[in-house]
Image (cartoon, rainbow, N blue to C red):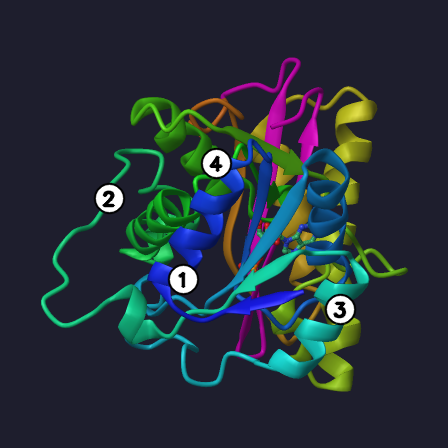
Amino acid sequence: MKIIRSVPEAMSYSNNLKRRRKSIGLVPTMGYLHEGHLSLARRATKENDTAIMSIFVNPAQFGPKEDLKKYPRDFKNDERLARSARISAIFYPSSRSMYPDGYKTYVEVENITKMLCGLSRPGHFRGVTTVVSKLFNIIRPDIAYFGQKDAQQAIVIKRMALDLNMGLKVKVLPIVRERDGLAMSSRNVYLSEKERSDARVLYEALDLARKLLKRGLRDPDKIKKRMTGLIETKKSAEIDYISISSIDDLEELKVVKKRALIALAVRIGKTRLIDNIIIGGYL
Ligand code: AMP
């Protein structure tokens, strides 16, 4: 497995693959890998001649009061895990090589970046779309792999790839969960033992919504109220948002008919966690 630390080296690595007509799968991550990331990596390996994983904690997508500095990092372990998933190369650039002095260009997707996570994290998606565009330009993958865990991100990136004629396929894979339902996340390491146990409530609330829908409740407000009630039984939990929206444009639904994205962000202590389920469809 190759470790590539500079942009020019990554470009020539990918150019060389292109010349030899090898297909390229790209898995963009911020590292501190877990089974969620590895499920994407394994799929990329399976479906392409070459699978490249990027590991880059992208400063542009963190707000000034967010956890950029303390975001967990463990490159040695990531390297071992990526190798176990048969990744061919890790692209592991420095911030300086991605955003050198004089850097001025950002990619902005309108509207769908302003709701849900966009409300409490202004500028977040602008950072995401910018870095993902750069990764797409550097690596020029045939297929890029993302997780449904970040459903809004996946929707935004699909929109961007389509709007800007990026000419690649964006695949979105299911959420990998711990045994008790908690969605795997690098940020789960921030949780104390008590918080880790309280954090189960995110999935429990989503599961409650699924059950209520199954019983025929179709009113998003009523469903959200029941979810709120459940989450508020945990003292450490503070709801950022609960949303029941269209999986196409993230507009809040007035009534749940066939398809819906039920998404939430909840702070458990100081740690902001997100999770979602999709009813009647997929991304
Ligand atoms: P991150 O390193 O958190 O930026 O995540 C990198 C990619 O892995 C994103 O496309 C995420 O949606 C995806 N991912 C993160 N957690 C999970 C999970 N639990 N299941 C599936 N995919 C995930």
Q: Residue at x 50, y 21 (%)?
A: 254
> The C terminus lies in which quarter of the figure?
top right
In the rendered view, tell whether residue 42 sits above or below residue 120.
Answer: above
Ligand 1 sits in which quadrant?
Answer: bottom right
| Disc on res. 9 | 1
The question of residue 167 being in magenta is answered with no
* Magenta: main secondary structure: strand
Amino acid type, mark 3:
Leu
> The N terminus lies in which quarter of the figure?
bottom right
In front: label 1 or label 2: 1
Question: CA–CA distance between discs 1 and 3?
Answer: 23 Å
Callout 4 touching callout 3 (CB < 8 Å): no
- Which of the two discs, 1 and 3, labels the residue nearer the N terminus? 1
Q: Is mark 1 on a helix, strand or loop?
A: helix
Amino acid type, mark 4:
Arg
Q: What element carries label 3?
A: helix
In front: label 2 or label 3: 3
Q: Position of residue 211 (x, y in %)?
A: 82, 33
Q: Locate residue 14 relative to residue 255 in the image: left or right.
A: left
For label 3, the residue is 81
Question: Is residue 230 among the parts visible in the rendering?
Answer: no
Depth check, front residue: 21 or 221 = 21
In the rendered view, tell whether residue 227 sits above or below residue 245.
Answer: below
Amino acid type, mark 1:
Glu
